[in-house]
Amino acid sequence: MEQWSTTAIPPTRRAPYWMEAVNKAYVQLECTVPSRSSAPFFGAITRHELAAVSLSHITSTTQTVLRTPLQISRASEDIFLLSIQVAGAGKLVQDDKTAYLQPGELALYDSTRPYQLLFDQDFEQYVLSLPGSILRNRLHNAEDMTACKITSAQSGTARLLSHMVSELTDCPPSGGPSVDTSLADSLVSILVAALAENLGGLPLQDNTGSVRRDRIKAYVLENLRDPQLNIGKIAKRLDLTPSTVHRAWEGEANSLTSWIWSMRLQGAEQDLRQLAHQHRTITEIAYHWGFSSSAHFSRAFRRHFGVPPKEVRENMRALAQADSKPI
């Protein structure tokens, strides 16, 4: 995990420090902040890698961010970025299109072409970044989807994507590279599904099987806590036959059933490591994530993570107590 904050930086040095932080966290950019203000500029970024995907959380006061042809010529980054507005408001401009973002709204932009991000008030965002090649392999004319606003309140997949990005950014997984890769793939699938759902007039590049797989993943992740979730229910809800679901899933490392249980275990592990859930018993968390037996949950958890759930809970509480002790 990487972190940048202007809190300890002298006010006169905050602008250049912030410029460097933004360039390290994202792509090569120009960033301007007000030179005269009643309050000093503030900005903070937390960022971590999840396999090929990058997740970040940014809070800041007023600023303008530019990706200019000069930066593009100097740096070869090919990155798609998705901004998820949490607080304040922002404006994204790319290719003569403008997306005005309010809390709960999302928009995509592409580092290979100039863009502007304009914030005239304090704001907070989550940002998902991924290599351009990954999205282009999944969507035809992905560039046409930039600066097109998506409202999570009107889109189940966008709402799910926003929730996953915020949860994984604030509480990064600790299961190792295989878990990171699985979660990153899930995020990409939900991003593709959200773009297809909300910007469906734009054609999909991938074949029908891959599109169905993305829909399956998005539906499963939105309904992980349903203890009745199974192949038959997935097929019925997506208007597919069970055999079509199985065919769409071909090529994945694990069976669909195994993947569902893996995602449930990762969700439970996240809850066990969060102070916000310390009042809930391990059994309650297990049932919340679709398990119907605490014994089954404990065995599966230990097999998946190498430690029992009780140890994860105890480690979380020990760390919390250590952090609360006065220095």
Image: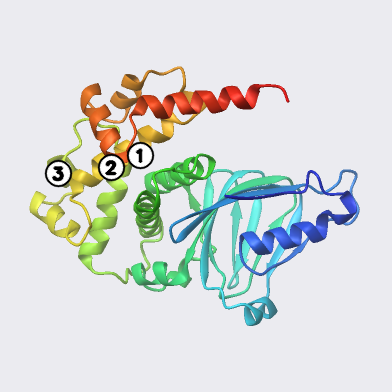
Q: Are marks 1 and 2 in contact (CB under 8 Å)?
A: yes
Q: Which residue is mark 1?
A: 266
Q: Which of the 4 quarters of the picture holds residue 34?
A: bottom right
- Whether 65 is drawn above or below 178: the answer is below
Where is mark 3, residue-wise? 231
- The answer for how far apart the CA atoms under marks 1 and 2 are is 6 Å
Mark 1 or mark 3, which has the lower sequence index? 3
Of 185 and 216, nearer the camera is 185
Between residue 170 and residue 106, name the one nearer to us: 170
**What residue appears at the point 87 percent right and 49 percent down from the top-left corner?**
10
Q: Residue at 52% of width from left, 24% of height from top?
A: 318
Residue nearest the viewer, comparing 8 with 238: 8
Judge the density around disc 2: few (<14), some (14-19), many (≥20) Cα neighbours within 10 Å: some
Picture coordinates of residue 129 (x, y %)?
A: 51, 60
Give the residue at x 68% y 60%: 22
Residue 35: x %, y % from top left: 89, 57
* Label of residue 132 in the image: none
What is the C-alpha distance between the residues marked 1 and 3?
Answer: 20 Å
